[in-house]
Image (tube, rainbow, N blue to C red):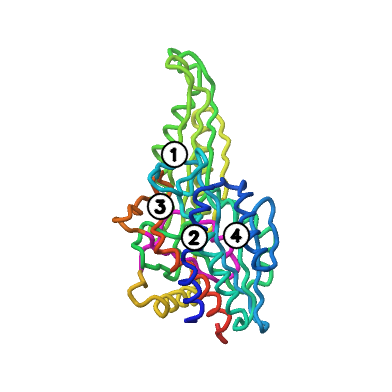
Amino acid sequence: MNTQIKHYILEHEDELIQNRRYLHQHPELSLEEFKTTQFIAQELDKLKVPYRLMEPTGVLAEIKGSEPGKTVLLRADMDALSIDELNHHLDYCSVEVGKMHACGHDAHTSMLLSALKALLSVKDQIKGTVRFIFQPAEEIGQGAKKMVEQGVLEDVDNVFGIHIWSVHETGQVVCDPGPSFASADIFKIHFKGKGGHAAQPHLSHDAVVMAAEYVNNVQSIISRSVDPLSPAVLTIGKFEAGDRFNIIAENAVLEGTVRTFNNETRSVVATQMQAYAEQIAEMYHGSVEFDYSYVTEVVDNHLQSAQLVQSITEQTFGKDFVHHDAPTMGAEDFGYYMKNIPGAFATVGCRNVDKETDYPHHHARFNVDEEALKYGAELYAQYALCYLNQDEF
Ligand code: NI
């Protein structure tokens, strides 16, 4: 644990909170984070830290230490959600109608900026390079991929990310080895039949029946084709069909999502879903358009990186901070950085019932206990320094 980093973060806690509040007031949706990008760029200009503006939004900044060495990537996401904020009692409530930082990405951006400043203050002690990524469009699962396509992983040896987490109390940090967030895919299945008069079903091919049969039986893929020790979720969230009560539906469209923790299970589910859709369409003399997209990768924490996060947490904040929890079927596009590079993703608790920061993520009353920001900022910075300065990893 580096005490200079700790002191820097604590001495500049006000600024950390003010930056988060500014970003909270001015949320921007995925791939529209132009002002947020500009805000970060201005901060970097003041610090004279070199950076690169990414397309269409996002920033890559770098601090090179006094000695050559490895490169560690620290990532914060920065997009908001299309939600009308209901925290009207806060003087930093969103001023943008229909837009809200309801997942805490405002906190991530502000924490990473503070970590950057803290690392700049110990630049002469850094062996290697710290690369900072302010990533857009996490909420639509596209941002990490866009960053990687623009080369942010070149020469990177290790990656680290944080999500502020209202499920856990302030003062709890979770980073267990293995899968922590599921892969998330989306699908759209369009059954096409032949419309007709409701009284003459024998002259038509009913798309409602095809889709209904699919919804009722498709879960057997999970219960009978997937290894029961490998979790998988198949949810159909949208079912749209028909035009009128007395017309047999020609079209029925289903949309949903699949979550898994490994690519083998993922591909079993996708393949069987398509085969089953085709069989049903054939049985009812219809046809089907099956559209399945792989969106985010599983976040699978590398053993040594997760252990490093845990030991840093213990040394920096105390043993009580190291918390453990089961993985979530929720998704995070951070997994895209970890496809070929080891690393870890931690959650930093920000739940405090007295401060009403116990609402779930993506809720119109979501808020962050700002006490937690300094823990996140310090964890980013300590991780980077510790990873780079250890001789063997
Ligand atoms: Ni999020």
- Which element type, helix, strand or loop, lies under badge 2? loop
Q: Tell me how far mark 4 sits from mark 1, CA to CA.
A: 31 Å
Going from N to C along the chain, the mark reached first, 1 or 3, is 1
Q: How far apart are marks 1 and 3 (CA)?
A: 27 Å
Find the distance from the CA under tag 2 to the CA under tag 3.
Answer: 32 Å
Check disc 2 and give the amino acid type: Asn
Using the numbered discs, state the Cα–Cα distance from disc 4 to disc 3 in whole angstroms. 21 Å
N-term-proximal mark, 2 vs 4: 4
Looking at this rendering, what residue extends furthest in the left direction?
354
Numbered disc in front, either 4 or 1: 4
Label ID, residue 153: none
Residue at 42% x, 55% y: name it: 329
Q: In which quarter of the image is residue 84?
A: top left
Residue at image mark 4: 134
Rendered location of residue 286, percent (x, y) = 54, 28
The residue stretch that appears in magenta: 324-350
Q: Are marks 4 and 3 in contact (CB under 8 Å)?
A: no
Residue bearing the label numbered 3: 367
**Residue at position x 51%, y 70% in the image:** 380
